[in-house]
Amino acid sequence: MGIRNSSLTRVQPVLDSLHAFDPTGTNCLLPLLRLASRSNRIADDFVPGQLSTPPRYEFSAPPPREFLRFLLANPATLAAPPEGGWRKWNEITQVNRRAFLAGDTFIQREGLRSLDAARDLSEGAWWRFEGVTSVDCALFTASTVVFIEGKRTEDGLRDRDVVGRTQSGNSKYGVCVGVGEGNKSFACLCSSRGRRGLVRAGNRSGT
């Protein structure tokens, strides 16, 4: 928040300047991606296309359905959070998640059925093991989605416990995959304390 808000102080000034200089992103977008430490994942002939909208800040992106389905279908990849962490959920969520983590296949099937029937993945449910992500900046072209995150107080991406799972950068990556329709290319850029990194680059079908 305030002077420590990485979106306001680190991401928006840079992207606003780039957009003012190059509104379509034709000249800036690909060089921006190639600044990343893992830019060797970007194909030599990759063309991101022109921006379809101005940079979108604090972009709210719900978790992708495919990612939630993977978590529900693979309970062994999850781990129970510390006992104190359960108290932030209501009683029904606690009961269902404890049963799910204990290997209750009926609860697992119910979760999968509920996921398939759900229209709005931004709403809370016991089977939604990933929350809505607020992305510092989102860039969209007809064929490409780019999420940009600025980290002021961290040396880089670090593991964190999220609803019974440990991840490193998977939240942003998962959301990237879920944005847009069709076979879109995607990338997530993370900048922190002088470091910059490409979390993931590829196309939606490659997940």
Image (spheres, rainbow, N blue to C red):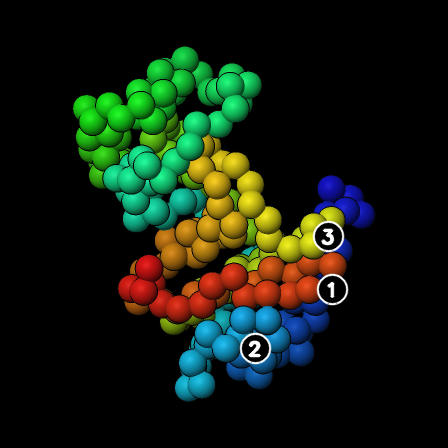
Residue 144 in sight: yes
* Separation of marks 3 and 2 at Cα, in angstroms: 21 Å
- In space, the residues marked 1 and 3 are separated at their CA atoms by 9 Å
Q: Secondary structure at mark 3?
A: loop
Asked whether the beta carbons under mark 1 and mark 3 sit within 8 Å of each other, the answer is: no
Mark 1 lies on residue: 194
Label 2 secondary element = helix
Residue 167: image x %, image y %? 49, 45
The residue located at (57%, 63%) in the rendering is: 189
Query: Is disc 1 surrounded by few (<14), some (14 to 19) or many (20+) residues within 10 Å?
Result: few
Residue highlighted by disc 2: 34
Task: Tell me which corner region of the image, top left, top right, bottom left or bottom right, holds residue 182.
Answer: bottom left
User: x and y percent of residue 176 in the render?
Assistant: 43, 56
Disc 3 designates what residue?
152
Q: Which kind of residue does numbered mark 2 sit on?
A: Arg
Whether residue 25 is visible, yes or no, is no
The quarter of the rendered structure image containing the N terminus is top right
